Image: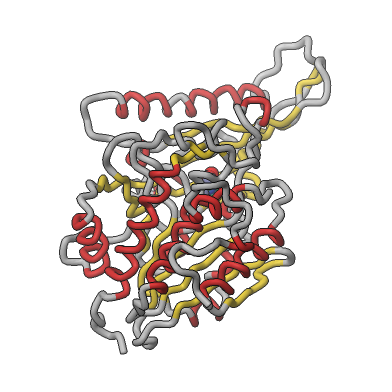
Amino acid sequence: MLPDKDGPGVGGGQSSPEGEDPSVSLFRDYLRLKTVHPEPDYDAALRFLDRAAEELELPVKKIEVCPGRVVSIMTWEGTKPTLKSILLNSHTDVVPVYQEHWKYDAFSAFKDAQGNIYGRGSQDMKSVTIQYIQAVRRLKVVGWEPRRTVHLMYVPDEEVGGHKGMETFVTHPEFQKLNIGFALDEGLANPSEAFTVFYGERNPWWITIRCPGSPGHGSRFVENTAAEKLVILCFVVNSTSHAFFRLNTSECFTLGDVTTVNMTMVKGGVAYNVIPAEMDVSFDLRIPPTVNLQVCFKAGVYGATLTGPQLSKHMNQNTTSTDVNDPWWSAFSAACKSMNMTLVKEIFPAATDSRFIRALGIPAIGFSPMNRTPILLHDHNEYLNEQVFLKGIGVYEALIPALTNVPALPGEA
Ligand SMILES: CSCC[C@H](NC=O)C(=O)O
Ligand SMILES: [Zn+2]
Ligand SMILES: [Zn+2]
């Protein structure tokens, strides 16, 4: 039996503080699960999502893509199930916290007098998971039925690159069976009245460069040392400041439009007085889809060599159409317009699981309905206001019908 309105919430809602919207209580319950790296409690998330699926009366499919790494999918079958489906994707994991820098326990989902709900994942992206679920719940309660099938997918390990999550799952036959036509995934908050939507991402490259050099006694003049090469690489990294400069001019660049390079790890050396024979230096590069990746390869690393394993070097640069004539974008943007929402289109500055979906040629939009909210993902004191959260449910309540009503496209059954 579906509940009357937003339902009692997973687990019966007994924990709902008096007067609190059940959707907010459900969100706070989900924030309390410690799906935090390096050892996320994925079982707790899967149990929580199973209970939600039971309440929604939706079938669940689980696929263990790697040992201990399960993708869970709730499916709301459409009245035209041969048409391509809509994917509502979210990841279940969250990044670690420095608890000493938080005002409240990062896993207590504390709500202050302004209605700000503090918790790791409140923006990234447990809010979106619950908003999808509650939007579906509301649509079911009023008896609405989708034409296209809707899949709510919950994936592990996005925060560590998605290798044991979405990257592997997109190669699985069960993924093909979902027959996805269009996907929604996470975006970022926007401090203004507007909402940001992401139609592409910068390519993340996590690379390690080995700098071999001449060894010797630490008291001598030695030419061509490993450390010397490492220092030259520091100058290369300095080019990041050019990108920063461009960001701060009147030119309309956002972080997603420029390349950034940060040296993030250095390894090498055994003793104060021994010049090491090699040093490894690691970089986090983010390259916009408009930059020729082959040129990046040829840029040269001053006699140093790339060494393995290169943790991530995403090469696909597909972006999603935001052309007025694109049927998915026009459905998405028209629904937002009907709610008087202002949209700002950008390239996502970091990486999400959308990149694996776009790489298959499937259009994907990164969108978390959080306006009037500072960008606090991965930061201390990450929070989301309950009113903003609740409005977001309404946004999906309009977006799901808009997207599932996109008429059959050429080539669709
Ligand atoms: C190289 S994949 C890294 C994925 C990660 N995603 C979220 O923060 C990021 O650092 O962007
Ligand atoms: Zn995220
Ligand atoms: Zn994240």
Residue shown at the point (20%, 50%) measured from the top left: 340
Look at the image and name its color scheme.
secondary structure
Relative depth, front residue between 270 and 155 = 155
Q: Can residue 279 be seen at all in this image of the molecule? A: yes
Q: Residue at x 40, y 50 (%)?
A: 390
Q: Nearer the viewer, residue 320 or 35?
A: 35
- Quadrant where the C terminus is found in the figure: bottom left
128 and 113: which is toward the camera: 113
User: Residue 277: x and y, percent?
Assistant: 75, 30
In the rendered image, residue 39, in percent from the top left (x then y), is placed at 73, 50
Q: In this view of the protein, which residue sits in the foreground, 105 or 36?
A: 105
Q: Residue at x 58, y 51 (%)?
A: 16
Give above or below for 379 relative to 351: above
- Residue 110 vs 155, above or below: the answer is above
Residue furthest to the front in view is 18
Q: Say how many tags the image has.
A: 0
Q: Is residue 144 left or right of residue 326?
A: right
Q: Is residue 40 above or below residue 120?
A: below
- Tell me which residue sits at (62%, 25%) in the image: 101
Residue at the far left in the pictured view: 325
Give the percent coordinates (x, y) of residue 215: 76, 25
Residue 54 occupies quadrant: bottom right
Image coordinates for residue 348, horizontal then vertical, percent = 39, 46
Question: Taking the image as drawn, is residue 159 in sight?
Answer: no
Quadrant for residue 370, please give it.
top left
